[in-house]
Amino acid sequence: MKKLVVTIDGPAGAGKTTTSKKLAELLGYRYIDTGALYRGIAYEVREKNIDPENAKSLEELCSSIKLNLINNHKGLRIISGNMDISDYIRTPEISMLASAVSAKPVVREFLLELQREMGREKNAVFEGRDMGTIVFPEAEVKFFLSASDKARALRRYLELCEISPQTLEEVERDMILRDKNDSSRVLAPLKPAEDAIIIDATDLSIDQVINLMLTHINNY
């Protein structure tokens, strides 16, 4: 089998995580959730009471933090230092804070090198928002997964309902705000790579999306 880097970018709620995990499993590849790395930074920013607008404090944090992604019986987990913080990074608060810190050059530079190191051996599916445009512009196969705002909000709401008291309307509002912030930032905005294969998953099942992706991968 060819050794490939596959990137899957797109906004929240489009089904990136479920699709990326299953695709990686079918290919026998590693699954890398890069959004978890930004959430890990956001978690530490909150825990250490750091001002996300303070570049010096962010730089000091990035120079001292040690993030790692591991797979165990619970699935993909993010470790900060020696602590598994996976169960604390999916709240709406961390989501918005991750969007804010991801726009900071010092954070992006730190995670850029970390992500590229993870991709050196290839055979990996990278899920994120700028994988195909910034992190792996030379990736062999790039996808951009999207869906309608309402479809994405419903998916996100169902994911969060056990850990967040937000209503569906509040989830949609926050999601659209985050998408706007991520798409309009100067540094690595959320957008499809010029050579990305764009898939609208509004009316597609996860299996249908994966079958489309596998067809493109097999034809590479």
Image (cartoon, helix red, strand yellow):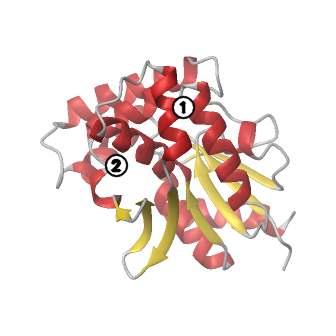
Which quadrant does the C terminus fall into? bottom right
Q: Which residue is mark 1?
A: 59
**Which of 211/7 is in front?**
7
Q: Position of residue 120 (x, y in %)?
A: 79, 62
Q: Is residue 76 above or below residue 195?
A: below
For label 2, the residue is: 155
Q: Earlier in the sequence, mark 1 or mark 2?
A: 1
Quarter of the rendering containing residue 6: bottom right
Left or right? Give the position of 54 relative to 3: left
Q: Position of residue 138 (x, y in %)?
A: 85, 48
Q: Nearer the viewer, residue 165 or 109?
A: 109
Indicate the quadrant where residue 168 lies.
top left
Number of other residues with Cα within 10 Å of mark 2, as a class: few under 14, some 14 to 19, many 20 or more? some
Side of 155 relative to 131 (left or right)? left
Query: Does 85 sit left or right of 9 as displayed?
Result: left
Q: Nearer the viewer, mark 1 or mark 2?
A: 1
Given residues 145 and 20, the one toward you in this image is: 20
Residue type, mark 2 in image: Arg
* Residue at the image position 49 percent from the left and 75 percent from the top: 71
Q: Amino acid at mark 1?
A: Glu
